[in-house]
């Protein structure tokens, strides 16, 4: 494959944009080499600036669940743009998408739209703190909730109660209010509640983790968190930025039958435009400005183009009763195919999957938390990534990311991918 033009464009970008990218993981730091520059995309395929065609398993990191340039979204955006691109005033569209989202998701009465998943999670914990009048939150090592200060906290030593910032610029003062737990480790969570009586505002969790590769919750784990929160008058926040409108119409709450107090959205909810949202029952949402004292705002929040795209996307998902079943069937076909060819090639691996979120870890042991996710063989992953790229299959350039399956993929695309994986596995 030729990457000549992408290489030149990257060199130009590096002169004027830090690292040549506007979001770090795009830079291929984890796998080496030069990132491809996108020119266009349609359905399941990406076309780069050198004219290469790639089967896309990133799908803009999740939003393109129905494929790139999905016609109803494209048409909605074009039509809407003709009437103005931003007003800073309420529009009817915002009520329409809010009503539809509320009808699809369990246990929410009101929803507030923002511009990214980061904003959604940042606002959700402010609301939880304002509502409970407590400062501390529990997050899980390996979960990503955007780049606001409270979340950029890495796992300290196993016994450590207080997090340490993992980015310069995050103060110790902020870090001390973020308590870290290991994913799927209930005892750890209980110990944090015991050591911080009446101080914990909320637990925030990716109900299916997707930022350490895909790591599903152990059976009963989410239910147990619900119970612990109830016993301690703390809120349970589901960060459904990845899982929302992907695992089911009502996201992970519906799939696992567990209700959260606040739910965060991003990715699919915007149809590829910059949209995030957070939602809860009235008793919580009514604490938000202008009804209540918890402040949160945005010049471009509820932007008409973004709302038009999001509404077209949610309507398509709402109308198509089979879409989540199709996604499950396609991803499970891919799962079986990858499992077979990696086994045939004698590789050590684990595949984790929930619905249309899937990832391959190059370690034979179960991957249940950040520690076990880190045991994966990164060298093998790098060669796997570049081998697949060379075959025209584009997966996330990091072992810590989930593949997002789109309904635009055909079974021929999946067979092509499985064959490509077989070819690459022979070289590993
Ligand atoms: N939460 C989760 C679970 C995410 O995966 C992400 C982004 N990958 C975010 C929050 C942050 O969203 P954004 O990048 O839109 O700010």
Image (cartoon, helix red, strand yellow):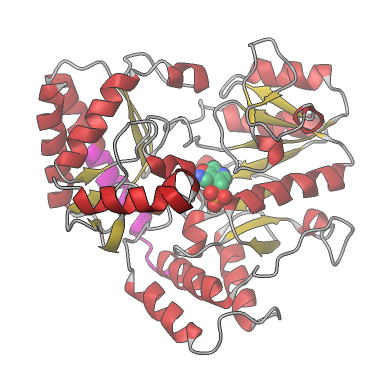
Q: Is residue 254 found left or right of 169 in the rendered image?
A: left
Counting every numbered tag in the picture gives 0
The part of the chain drawn in magenta is 319-334
Can residue 252 be spotted in the picture?
Answer: no
Q: Vertically, is 352 above or below 53?
A: above
Location of the N terminus by quadrant is: top left
Residue shown at the point (50%, 68%) measured from the top left: 310
Q: Quadrant of residue 387?
A: top left
**Does the magenta-highlighted stretch encompass residue 321?**
yes
Magenta part, dominant SS = helix
**Does the magenta-highlighted stretch encompass residue 347?**
no
Q: Position of residue 303 (x, y in %)?
A: 60, 73
Location of the C terminus by quadrant is: top left
Q: Quadrant of residue 383?
A: top left
Residue shown at the point (70%, 47%) measured from the top left: 122
Q: Nearer the viewer, residue 367 or 108?
A: 367
Q: Vertically, is 262 above or below 186?
A: below
Direction bottom: furthest residue:
83
Q: Position of residue 197 (x, y in %)?
A: 87, 23
Q: Is residue 85 found left or right of 340 in the rendered image?
A: right
Q: Position of residue 246 (x, y in %)?
A: 44, 51
Q: Vertically, is 34 above or below 427?
A: below
Q: Is residue 45 found left or right of 287 in the rendered image?
A: left
Can residue 266 be spotted in the picture?
Answer: yes
Q: Nearer the viewer, residue 121 or 190?
A: 121
Q: Position of residue 208 (x, y in %)?
A: 50, 36
Q: Vertically, is 192 above or below 296?
A: above
């Amino acid at each position: 494959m030729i990457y000549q033009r992408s290489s030149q464009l990257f060199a130009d970008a590096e002169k004027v944009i830090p690292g040549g990218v506007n979001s770090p993981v795009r830079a291929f730091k984890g796998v080496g080499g030069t990132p491809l520059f996108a020119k266009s995309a349609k359905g399941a395929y990406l076309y780069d600036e050198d004219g290469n065609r790639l089967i896309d398993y990133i799908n803009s990191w999740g939003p393109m669940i129905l494929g790139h340039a999905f016609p109803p979204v494209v048409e909605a955006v074009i039509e809407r743009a003709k009437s103005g691109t931003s007003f800073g005033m309420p529009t009817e569209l915002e009520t329409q998408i809010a009503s539809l989202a509320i009808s699809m998701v369990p246990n929410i009465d009101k929803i507030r739209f923002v511009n990214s998943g980061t904003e959604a999670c940042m606002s959700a914990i402010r609301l939880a703190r304002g509502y409970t009048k407590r400062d501390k939150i529990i997050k899980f090592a390996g979960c990503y909730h955007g780049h606001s200060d409270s979340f950029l906290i890495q796992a300290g030593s196993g016994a450590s109660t207080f997090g340490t910032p993992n980015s310069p610029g995050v103060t110790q003062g902020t870090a001390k209010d973020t308590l870290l737990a290991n994913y799927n480790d209930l005892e750890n969570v209980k110990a944090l509640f015991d050591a911080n009586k009446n101080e914990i505002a909320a637990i925030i969790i990716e109900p299916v983790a997707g930022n350490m590769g895909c790591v599903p919750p152990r059976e009963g784990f989410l239910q147990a968190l619900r119970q612990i929160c109830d016993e301690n008058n703390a809120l349970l926040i589901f960060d459904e930025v990845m899982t929302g409108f992907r695992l089911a119409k009502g996201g992970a709450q519906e799939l696992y039958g567990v209700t959260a107090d606040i739910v965060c959205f991003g990715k699919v909810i915007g149809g590829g435009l910059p949209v995030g949202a957070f939602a809860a029952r009235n008793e919580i949402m009514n604490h938000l400005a202008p009804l209540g004292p918890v402040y949160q705002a945005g010049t471009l929040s509820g932007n008409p183009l973004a709302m038009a795209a999001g509404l077209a996307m949610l309507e398509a998902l709402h109308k198509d009763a089979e879409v989540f079943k199709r996604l499950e069937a396609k991803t499970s076909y891919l799962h079986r195919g990858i499992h077979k060819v990696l086994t045939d090639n004698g590789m050590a691996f684990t595949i984790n999957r929930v619905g249309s979120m899937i990832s391959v870890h190059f370690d034979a042991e179960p991957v249940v938390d950040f520690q076990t996710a880190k045991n994966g063989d990164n060298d093998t992953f790098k060669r796997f990534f570049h081998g697949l790229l060379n075959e025209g299959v584009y997966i996330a350039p990091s072992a810590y990311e989930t593949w997002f399956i789109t309904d635009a993929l055909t079974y021929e695309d999946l067979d092509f991918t499985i064959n490509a994986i077989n070819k690459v596995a022979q070289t590993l």
